Structures are given as structure tokens and as C-alpha cells.
Image: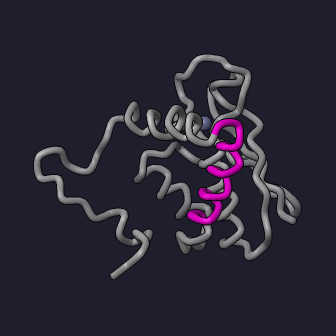
Amino acid sequence: MKDKVRLEDIRKTDRPTLGDDVPVEVFRLLRVIGMYSILGEGSGYTLYLAGKELGEGLGLDSMEELAKLFRRLKIGVLKVLDALEDKMTVRVDECITCSGLPYTGKMICHFEGGIIAGAVQKILDRPTKAVQTKSHTAGFDHCEFLVYLL
Ligand SMILES: [Zn+2]
């Protein structure tokens, strides 16, 4: 008996009437409201670490694959703006977590940043740390992440 649902199991669904899609609203209930009420102020770092582990485990080989995955899972429209020796700038439009949300002054897309950091770490085989620099909730019309290559 398995003690944990694994990544390859996540895609399996048995929903003949409702299908595989859920409204963004449901995702945000869990992600933005649920996680925060359980984990409080620490939810950001926890979600970042969870995302990073997930991102590494995806087994991707290129940023193009990551962009395709983001689009297929409707996480957002990902684009690498620049890739330097020590850092990469990644833009995400239509972010599943924050697009359309009102201004709060806070960056809230920790999970997405974690996925990007983990995926880049695997792709480039270098340790990474991602920092969100733009978000809808911080007054921008897209998300942006700086991925430091350590
Ligand atoms: Zn976002």
C-alpha cells in the first residue's frame, strides 16, 4: 500500500460528469485562502518549498518544456525575458494565483516561484532561489520572478 499520492498519480481522475477542469476560484480558495488560514504568515515559504520540490520532480529538460507545462496546466503563460550567467528573469501572464486580484501590496505567488526555481534547478543542474518581483497584487499586470543561479 502506498503511503503518499505521487506526482504521476495526480493526473488520474474519475470524473465522467465533471471532467478534469476546476474553476480558478476553487484553486484560489485552497491556495490563497485555505493555505493562509492554516499556515498563516509562514504559508509563503512553505508553498515555495513545496513548489520547488514539485518543480524539480517534474523532470523537465528545457524552459520551453516548462512553458508548455504552465500552459497545459493553466498555471500561466510563462516566458523567459532574459537568461544571464547568474540569474534569469521569468515573466508569467495570466497567473492562476494572482491575475485579476486587487492590490494588497504583497507578492503571493510563492508556489509558482517555487515550481520555476525547482524546474530551473533541474534543467541547469545548478542550485536556485527564486524571488517574485512583480504581481497583480502588487500593482502590476503580470507576474515576474528573478531566479538566482547560485
Ligand atoms: Zn501571480
**Quick one: which residue is furthest to the bottom in this view?**
1
At horizontal 55% and vertical 60% (from top left) the residue drawn is 66
Q: Position of residue 146 (x, y in %)?
A: 78, 48
Q: Which residues are magenta?
A: 40-55
Q: Position of residue 99 (x, y in %)?
A: 54, 29
Of residues 58 and 30, the one drawn nearer to the viewer in this rendering = 30
Q: Is residue 80 left or right of residue 34?
A: right
Q: Position of residue 31 (x, y in %)?
A: 51, 40
**Quick one: which residue is furthest to the left in this view?**
17
Q: Is residue 6 left or right of residue 125?
A: left
Of residues 140 and 25, the one drawn nearer to the viewer in this rendering = 25
At horizontal 62% and vertical 69% (from top left) the residue drawn is 56
> In which of the image's four quarters is ligand 1 placed?
top right
Is residue 9 one of those drawn in magenta?
no
The secondary structure that most of the magenta stretch takes on is: helix
In which quadrant of the rendered image does the N terminus lie? Answer: bottom left
Q: Is residue 14 above or below residue 42?
A: below
Image quadrant assignment for residue 53: bottom right
Image quadrant assignment for residue 67: bottom right
At horizontal 59% and vertical 17% (from top left) the residue drawn is 102
Here the colouring is: one colour
Q: Is residue 150 left or right of residue 62?
A: right
Of residues 4 and 120, the one drawn nearer to the viewer in this rendering = 4
Q: Position of residue 23 (x, y in %)?
A: 34, 35
In which quadrant of the rendered image does the C terminus lie? Answer: bottom right
Q: Is residue 126 above or below residue 14?
A: below
The number of numbered badges drawn on the structure is 0
Q: Is residue 3 above or below residue 143?
A: below
At horizontal 43% and vertical 71% (from top left) the residue drawn is 4
Q: Is residue 126 above or below residue 89?
A: below
